[in-house]
Every structure is written in C-alpha cells, then in structure tokens.
Amino acid sequence: MASPFGELTVIVNPHAGRRRVGQEIPELERTLQARALPYRLLRTEGPGDATRFAREALSNGGRFVVAVGGDGTVHEVVNGMFGDDGTTIVPQPVLGVVAAGSGCDFVRTFGLPGDVTRSCQHLLGENTYPLDVGKITYAGSNGERAVRYFPNVAEAGLGAAVAARADRLPVSLGQAKYFVGFWLTLPRFRLAKLKVRADRKDYEGPGLMVIVGNCQYYGGGMKISPRSYPGDGVLDVLIFKGPKSDSFTLLPKVYRGEHLPHPRVAEFRVKEALEVDADRPLPIEADGEVLGSTPATFEVVPQAILMKL
C-alpha cells in the first residue's frame, strides 16, 4: 500500500526516551513493512543530524518525512524542512511523527498515540492537518542574529531557564526532569522588566516568562496554552507577570489547562509579529531546545507543513 505522498524518509533518534526509541526500531520496521509502506530509515548520531537528513530528503525530491522520537527530534526535522529563504524546501512537506514511548508533548495536541504500532497506522492514507509553524529570530551565543522554527511551544524567561537546568539533570528522571528543574530554578530567578509588542498591542511591566504557543502542551504534559489551535494562523502569547509565589498555585492548574483566565497572566493573539525585550537578556527555548536569548521576534508561518494524522 504505497503512500500518496511517496516514499517515507524515517528519521530515528535512537537515544530518545532514555534509549527506548532505539529498542523500538525493529518493531517500527516490522510495522512499516506489514503495511507495505516504502521507506528509508536513517539513524541520528548527534545534534543537527535530523535537520540535515530532512533537508537532504526534501532537496532530493522527497516530500514525506517521519520523525521518530521526542520533541527535540520533531523540532530538528521541522527546521530541516525550511530553506535559507524562509520558505519550505518543497511546497507543504508532509510531517509524520512516531513518538515511540519518548513522551512527545507535540503529539498530545493532536491526540496521537505514543506507541509504535498505533503511531504507524497514522502514516497510512491521505488524512493531513495544515500546520502552522512559529519562527524565532533571536540573539545567538555570540550576539549574532539567528533563526529557528518551532512547531509546538516556545518561550522566553523562567521556562527557558528551567529547560536549561532540566538538560543537566539525570536522564533517569524521564518526563519528571522539567518538574524537578522548575523547583531548582525558581528560587534564583529574578522577575524581569519586559517590553513586549504583540502586533499593535504593547505590554511593559514585570514578567517571569513569555509563552508562545502554536500547540497546547509542553514540559512533560503541561497544557500551557489551552487556547492554541495549530492551524489558525495565530500564535497564542501568555505573559506570566509574577510574583514568583503564583507558581505554587498556578502550576497544578497548568497541567490541567485551567490557569486561564488569570488576572496576572496577560493574553495576546499574534498574527504578524511578537517582539520581546527585557532589562537583561532572557534565555529562549523552543520545543524543549535551549536556543539563545532576547531580544527576539516571534512570527507565524501559516499552514507551512501538512501534519500526517
């Protein structure tokens, strides 16, 4: 049963999910073969490989790229779908995702399963969802301007500092890394003075973090941006104003997506551009990947990719 989108380029991060994804590769291949899906399987060995593999696949005439792993693998594959000119290498490339037990937050918005057999079922047929992609222009490590794309959620401030801290925690913590990292980071994180422009609306004042949601979930299952619909051409922006003590009452609600509306969370919907600056450089992360710092501009690329459902 050939795919209507041609051969699948299957990009596997065998280290994702505490190496569980690597253990799932034989089952993945058996399932693809049982469904008669033509595919080419590529294993990543380090950062940047998934981006390079995706870019090469599309440049060589492919259209359907499948990310097997967690949010970091999806993030890299999506970045490989864009060229230097800011457009996708081919019109509306098709993205498939097999979470394979890695705890991928991105697939939660779509209700996709986390196991290989059921995930592969979604690679069949023509059913797709036109997916917006966020674009960040930010300050890189040497102060140079850098660009990165994100399909899920990005942020500036406390959450990015938490992601950086979580990266240094033992992998044995699994999805709990973000939760532990949060409580380790919070005591030392200072409120920033933010200067934000969301299209033609401004916010100047205190802030712990700025959330930019294309999809709804991040941080190991938190429904941080419950109003986000990833095909509406809009980025949903939340500014958590503080104080830090709000974290104790808000965090349980965030897991359920019940933290909005809230008097100390400013909400914006951005169709054009979100500009974020602060009284000090704030760290930025996207899809769990720590990138650089503010000042930063966030934009939406409407329906750039077809998400395979």
Image (cartoon, rainbow, N blue to C red):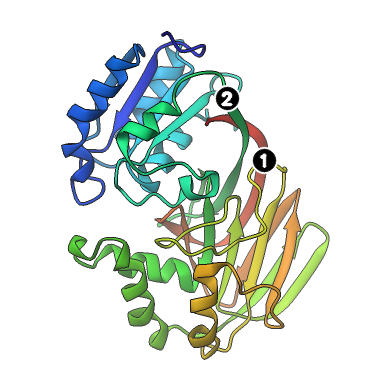
The quarter holding residue 208 reads bottom right
Is 230 located above or below residue 257 in the figure? above
* Spot occupied by residue 227 in the image (x, y as percentages of width and height): 67, 58
Q: Which mark is residue 307?
A: none
The quarter holding residue 207 reads bottom right
**Nearest-to-viewer mark from 2 and 1:** 2
Q: Who's the residue at 55% across and 87% down the image? A: 246
**Residue at the right extreme of this rendering:** 200
* Spot occupied by residue 122 in the image (x, y as percentages of width and height): 45, 29
- Reading the image, the residue beneath label 2 is 127
Q: Who's the residue at 53% across and 71% down the image? A: 254
Q: Nearer the viewer, residue 39 or 290?
A: 39
Q: Amino acid at mark 1?
A: Gly
Task: Tell me the SS state at disc 1.
Answer: loop
* Spot occupied by residue 270 in the image (x, y as percentages of width and height): 74, 54
Q: Who's the residue at 60% across and 46% down the image? A: 134
Q: Amino acid at mark 2?
A: Asn
Precedes in sequence: disc 2 or disc 1: 2
- Whether residue 51 is visible: no
* Spot occupied by residue 173 in the image (x, y as percentages of width and height): 23, 66
Asked if residue 23 lies left or right of residue 34, the reply is left
- Reading the image, the residue beneath label 1 is 231
Q: Quadrant of the N terminus?
A: top left
- Whether residue 123 is visible: yes
Is 173 located above or below residue 307 in the figure? below
Task: Tell me the SS state at disc 2.
Answer: loop
Q: What crowding class fits label 2: few (fewer than 14 Cα within 10 Å), some (14-19), or many (20 or more)?
A: few
Q: What crowding class fits label 1: few (fewer than 14 Cα within 10 Å), some (14-19), or many (20 or more)?
A: many
